[in-house]
Amino acid sequence: MHAPTYKDNTTIFVMIGMTAFRRLILFCVCGCLLAAASRPAMGVEVTDRAVGDAIERMKAYLYYKQDAQTGSWEFRSRSGGVESDALQVGGESSLVTLALLYSGESAQNPKLARAIQYLRSIEMKGTYAVAIRAHVWAALPPEYMPMLEVDASWLLQSANKHKLGLFDYQPIASDRVDHSVTQYGMLGLWEASKRGLKIPRKYWERWVQHFVSAQREDGGWTYGPNADAITTGSMTAAGLTALFVGQQELYATNRRPDPNVAKAINKGVAWLDGRFTGNNNPGANEWTYYYLYGIERVALSSGFRYLNGKDWYESGARHILANVAENGSIDDDFTKTSFGLMFLSRGRVPVWVNKLQMSGLKWNNRPSDLYFLTHYLSNQIEKEINWQVIGVDAPSEEWLVAPVAYLASHEAFHPDEQQKEAIKRYLDLGGMLVANPDGGSAEFADSIRALAGELYPQYELKKLDPKHVLFNCWNRLTNPEKLALESLSNGARELIVLPGDDWSEVFQSDKDHGSSAVWALATNVFAYATDRGALDNRLLQTDVTGAGVGMAGEVSVGRARYDGNWLPEPAAWDTQADYCMSHSGVSVTTSAANGGRVLDLDQIGRCDYKVVHLTGTHAIFLTDQQKSAIQQYVKRGGTILIETVGGLGEFSRSLEKQLSNLFNAFAVPLTGADAIISGRGLDGGQDISRALYRRYTVVKYQFDPRPRLAALLTEDGRPMVILSHEDLSLGMLGARHWNISGYQPGTARKLMNNLVVWAKQQKLDR
């Protein structure tokens, strides 16, 4: 794997330097922060449930350790010892309070409210303590802004007293160089800057200049400038922190990253990429938990998903889960537990967009564009979300943790055949591509139009109608025709969106975030692709597994072709097949546009598929040959499932009328008495008498909580034609688009699983 390259100057929060910890009782009892004895972690299963359970236990432990009288966690800094330790009174309580806030605890919780009141009541004298407390104020409602202003002023005065303009443990004039304290002071001021407080530019310039010059030849950083000092993972994370933050503050309006800083960041990330494991701090082999939290801050800021070929979150979470005791502690140490809690909590949040990386393409001209957009969207939905960078060469299934892929450049995009396949596979599996022409590049836009025509020759990339849902699904835009937005649709959902404006430049450089129509339209794209923010945690978003069962047979499903939009969602059964195998043990084989044998509708009469899934978006009219083939197929015992993909077209309704006339029968609703709905008598079936519908469906139609499948029945009462006017395919995929009328993924998958198990029991005459 190639080392990740510089991608973003974004969110970095609490990362504490290694040697400072040795001197600081704030964060460690002597010997207590030595790395936990490595207990085997390979067997630990990293699931969302396991992470959630650990988070709850860790929170309970931290509350257990709280001083009941003061609401604080001040045990070490009050114990005396090294002079610099006593300066950090309040820092321990700030760290634990911050961890609890990041884990989702409300400031209204009486125990946490006492801790916040304690922090308001004490005078702090140390850089670490004040900087962490600044993070706490920044994580609280606006009424805490005055406290943030006070701490920011303290930090500025502290830095100003140093000859080098850096930080030390306390605000005294000093020539001492301490990377740990300096990056920590920067972070406290960065929290203030993000909330509108003005930090003089000269400070950011000095800090960036220092960390660029202090980088070692190997690409990493040490605790200080001592030539004999060892490069460590924790200090390399600190150096990257300083550069990411400084770049964001200094160069947000640049059309290209600063080359010197970008080079330093690339070297630093390469150092980490070559040495990362989830269970130790490279170069130090101690301070593992605060190092992991530092890795998380760098990963979330840069967007990269992998280090040293490993998913950084999964690797770190596995180590933490293996070392969390039943009482929720890590080594009965609340600082280790706090860092572990912050790692698990912040890395767990949903990922909504992939920024696509491609070798040879200038794909990252605006490194902070998606950070600012993601932060803005988090505020809009009042829920934290993340973004990530992923290579175009990565398997498309790995992209699916995010429903949107974002590609930006001023150069023409010319993927090879394998990369084209990955892009199309991602789109077919429910994703959406937003392609941004940096600088309004016509060269890039034309290459996207050519790619769209090659991937989907049956559809057209065209300018959207001003009445399109993308102009009103969250914000109602005035004069949308001026936005020149192009899109390619499969008739049910948008696959590729091509802005006419340079969105990337607006996201990175617009200080008044949300002030222009671009912000409003980008918010609409997010709302459209996520069912208005209905995102699962990152470990759940692609999970279709169940408890696991043994092999229980095979069912063949055919996809029937006709003259029209016969296969808008070609990959729906790929995901559904995984679900069926996991939940009922039934192996599903399908015919599809790519790979399997394609069935023409007028040729299904003698086919050997137990179920023929007939899909479309618009009304069609059957030929005599197609009607004859349908009659022959169902007479042999076959079952046809007819679905309007997206749930808003007339496809299934047009066929219901024609087939009712053909069979001289009316469609009747399937009820809880039918096995396909109740699951009764089906090995691996599930009761779905109460259905869950998409938000859009609930808002627009307010259906009763029951499935709305209907069927034309044979004389003996067997469903021969099943009709769904509501969408099933996007539910099978797990795609959560707005403007889709249909079932939520869980209900859609259960319905189709029941149909598969039921079809396995049916006899198809040869």
Image (cartoon, rainbow, N blue to C red):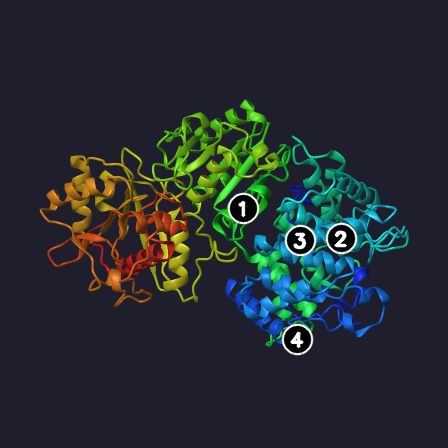
Q: CA distance from mark 3 to mark 1?
A: 44 Å
- On the image, the x and y values in percent for residue 550 come to 40, 67
Q: In the rendered view, would you say 279 is above or below 359?
A: below
Tell me the kind of residue under disc 3.
Leu
- For the question of whether residue 742 can be seen, the reply is no
**What residue sits right under mark 4 in the picture?**
67
Instruction: Determine whether label 3 and label 1 are within 8 Å by CB.
Output: no
Classify mark 3: helix, strand or loop.
helix
Q: CA distance from mark 4 to mark 3?
A: 25 Å
Describe residue 129's horizontal placement relative to residue 575 as left or right. right
Of residues 314 and 69, the one nearer the viewer is 69
Classify mark 4: helix, strand or loop.
loop
* Residue at 41 percent of width and 29 percent of height: 480
* Number of the label disc, if any, that sits on residue 154: 2
Tell me the kind of residue under disc 1.
Pro
Classify mark 1: helix, strand or loop.
loop
Of residues 405 and 344, the one nearer the viewer is 344
- Would you identify the image quadrant in which residue 684 lies? bottom left
Tell me the kind of residue under disc 4.
Asp
**What residue sits right under mark 3 in the picture?**
148
Nearest to viewer (mark 4 / mark 2): 2
